[in-house]
Image: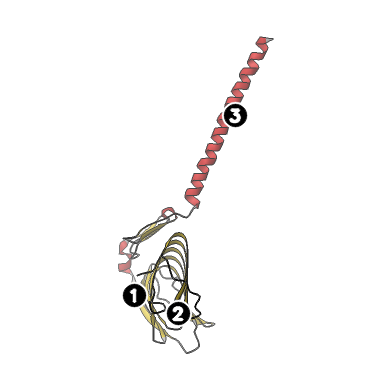
Amino acid sequence: MTSDVKPVRARRGRVLKWLAIGTVAFFGLIFLSGLTALRYLSPVLSFDEKSGRIVALGGLIELDEELNQMHLGNMQLPRGLQQESTEYSGEQELSPGRVEKIRVPFNTAKLEVTGTNEKAVRWKCRSMGAGPQPTIAAGVLNFNLDGLNLAKCSIAIPLGLVAEFVGINGQLNVKDPSDSMTISLVNGKVNIQLDPTLVYDVDVNVKNGLADFFPRSSDKKAIKLSVDVVNGLVKQDL
């Protein structure tokens, strides 16, 4: 009877051994899969404060301060691209009471935004695409920059006009805003220079990155600024 039991114990031992190995391998696979998912699904952001270079989504998108070089996936845009671009300038006269808001959608751009006492929106852009063609509808001036590649624009907005900027990649420099403004950016940097003589209520939301401290106020006369950035920086100075 003893000789009949020993083989059973041996087989049982081998089964338990392979079960243990399989369990360790299973949990190891789960751990490695978790690391892989964290690497490829989590928003990753790194930046160099001195150079202004921003790398988002694990290197999928790279921007530098002057937008002279960019990587979009496997496509690299050379530094000399801006030298081959075309400059556009123009203005859009605004009739009293006809326009209350300006909306600026863009794909990849660096924008310099200032205010003006004149009754016209003025702009100067350099890009690889066709120049912007503003349209007016329902009290909104649509200044569409989606068709411009690597646009670099300075825009002067008349006082009293609410502004909305909606972009994918780039940088916005806003100087002394005197009216309400909304900025929504996926990847990049927003610099805001506040006018010390005005009262502001600034709501900043950065999902992945850093933001300076901005003043909040419940004063009814406070100028409301809303900044929403997914990956990037929001600074209080230019």
Kindly indicate the quadrant of the structure image that contains residue 178. Answer: bottom left
**Residue 185, numbered circle:** none
Question: Which residue is located at x 63 percent, y 18 percent?
Answer: 9
Which mark is drawn over residue 87?
1
Query: Is residue 40 or residue 9 the one in the foreground?
Result: 9
**Alpha carbon of mark 3 to alpha carbon of mark 2: how far?**
68 Å
- Mark 1 residue crowding within 10 angstroms, few (<14) / some (14–19) / many (20+): some
The quadrant of the image that shows the C terminus is bottom left
Disc 1 versus disc 3: nearer the observer = 3
Q: In 3D space, how far apart are the residues under numbered discs 2 and 1 (Cα atoms)? A: 28 Å
**Residue 111, above or below 231:** below
**Which of these two is toward me, 42 or 138?**
42
Q: Residue at label 3? A: 19
Does label 3 or label 2 sit earlier along the sequence? 3
Q: In the shown orientation, is residue 172 left or right of residue 12?
A: left
Q: Name the residue under label 2.
A: 179
What's under tag 2, amino acid-wise? Asp
Quadrant where the N terminus is found in the figure: top right
Q: Is residue 59 above or below residue 100?
A: above
**Residue 80 image offset from top left, x and y in percent:** 30, 64
> Where in the figure is residue 103, as x and y percent of width and height?
48, 76
Mark 3 falls on what kind of element?
helix
Measured in 3D between alpha carbons, the distance from the residue under mark 1 to the one under mark 3, in whole angstroms, is: 70 Å
- Near mark 2 (Cα within 10 A), the count class, few <14, some 14-19 or many ≥20, is some
Between marks 2 and 1 in the image, the one whose residue lies nearer the viewer: 2
Mark in front: 3 vs 2: 2
Front-lying residue, 104 or 74: 104
- For marks 2 and 1, the one nearer the N-term is 1
Residue lying farthest to the bottom in this orientation: 96
Say which element carries label 2: loop
Q: Residue furthest right?
A: 1
